[in-house]
Image (cartoon, helix red, strand yellow):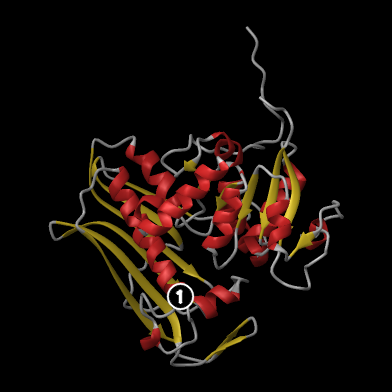
Amino acid sequence: MSSRPLRVIQWATGAVGTEMVKTILDHRTDLELVGARVYSDSKDGVDVGTLVGRSPVGVTATTDVAEILAMDADVVLYAPSFISLDDVCALLETGKNVATVSFLFHPQRIGDADRRRLLAACHKGNSTIHASGLNPGNLSGVLPLALSGMSRTIDRFTLQERADWSLWESTDITFDGMWFGRPPEDITPTANEFLTFNTALFTQQTWFIADTLNAAIDDVAVTVDAVPATKDFKIFDHQVRAGTTAGQRWNFVGHRRGRPIIEFETLWTVGGDYPEHWPAPDDGWTLTLEGDPSMRVHFFCLASFSRPASVAEHVRAGLVAVALQVVNAIPAICAAPAGFATMADLPLIRSYTGFGDGPNVITD
């Protein structure tokens, strides 16, 4: 087995991509950053270390996809806001494994043509693709499977996410993608390309739970309740007018013989107000398994529970959690057979750095 560091290309250096790069530079001697794909002209040609607030590292970011494809790398951390299947297949065909937080959380339930195309790319390049993150990701895939190890039987699964997006810096997703600030009647599961894509992600995640935990569901029903703002307010450089969308409640429900048994519910707002007619779980994620036995887990991610921290630090903590679920999986992804490696396929992913003292060596 080679002892050289695994060579990594960072694809997109937005909020999550920045945390991926920082982790590699600051904590991962087993990983070597060799390239970065960026989207804006202002980042093109800039040292990646500079882009993430570190000293220059001698790796220059580029907007040129052909340049990225020509690089020799073991894995690409693929983290754009909007995906391109052409780019992903090209990466896989050139022998680069792909680890993504952007899509493909349950490849068995994507369209047949796309699935066959991705598999063909993997086989051509002898490469692997894996997806994870938070939700969809660890909280909707890995954690439920881990809890199910303590179950005799499961009757119902529910994951609720409650979050205010006001401090999320990726406003292209908030406003251009999710259409906050648009008329409530515009918000439907297929209203634009991003909402169609997002609907597919959560629908596939519902099927992931069904397929991995032996639930013969008949369908996944999708509903959305868009709630108007009661006043004007501003999120970064975007104005949200009273009467336009400030809340979106999405429900993705898997039915078996007409009864709901698997449900993902997202309760998303901007501007700080919360609709009175919605369920009111704690902020964060609440996972409930009804069965034998019944279990409930609440997950909330902060910069610290023991020291004062700024709002910006707390927001960044969530980005770190999304990024690290994939970064920590890099060695397992590179060691996996060619093809799809899902959250159910990889071994348990744990922190590489942990407490920071290096591996304990126990001798006889």
Secondary element at image label 1:
helix
Q: Residue 216: in sight, yes or no?
A: yes
Residue 245 relative to residue 126: left or right: left
* 206 over 250 or under it: above or below: above
Q: Residue at the location (76% across, 48% down)?
A: 34
- Observer-nearest of 132 and 275: 132
> According to the image, label 1 marks what residue?
193
Q: Is residue 87 above or below residue 154?
A: below
Name the quadrant containing residue 228: bottom left
Q: How many marks?
A: 1
Between residue 107 and residue 364, name the one nearer to us. Answer: 107
Task: Give neighbour class at mark 1: few <14, some 14-19, many 20+ (Cα, 10 Å).
Answer: few
The image quarter in which residue 260 lies? bottom left
Residue 197 relative to residue 31: left or right: left
Q: Quadrant of the C terminus?
A: top right
Across and down, in percent, residue 325 comes to: 56, 47
Residue under the image location 36 percent in, 75 percent down: 189
Q: Quadrant of residue 41?
A: bottom right
Is residue 128 shown to the viewer in this render?
A: no
Residue 77: x and y, percent?
62, 52
Considering the image in quadrants, where does the N terminus appear? Answer: top right
User: Measured from the top left, where is residue 235 in percent x and y?
Assistant: 60, 81
Say which amino acid is labelled 1.
Answer: Glu
The relative height of residue 330 versus residue 20 in the rendered view (above or below) is: above
Left or right of 58 on screen, residue 196? left
Q: Position of residue 81 (x, y in %)?
A: 57, 67
Q: Residue furthest top?
A: 364
Q: Nearer the viewer, residue 185 or 358?
A: 185
Residue 301 lies left or right of residue 60; in this view the side is left
Q: Residue, x 45% and y 89% (percent of image)?
A: 244
* Residue at image point 75% right, 47% down: 33
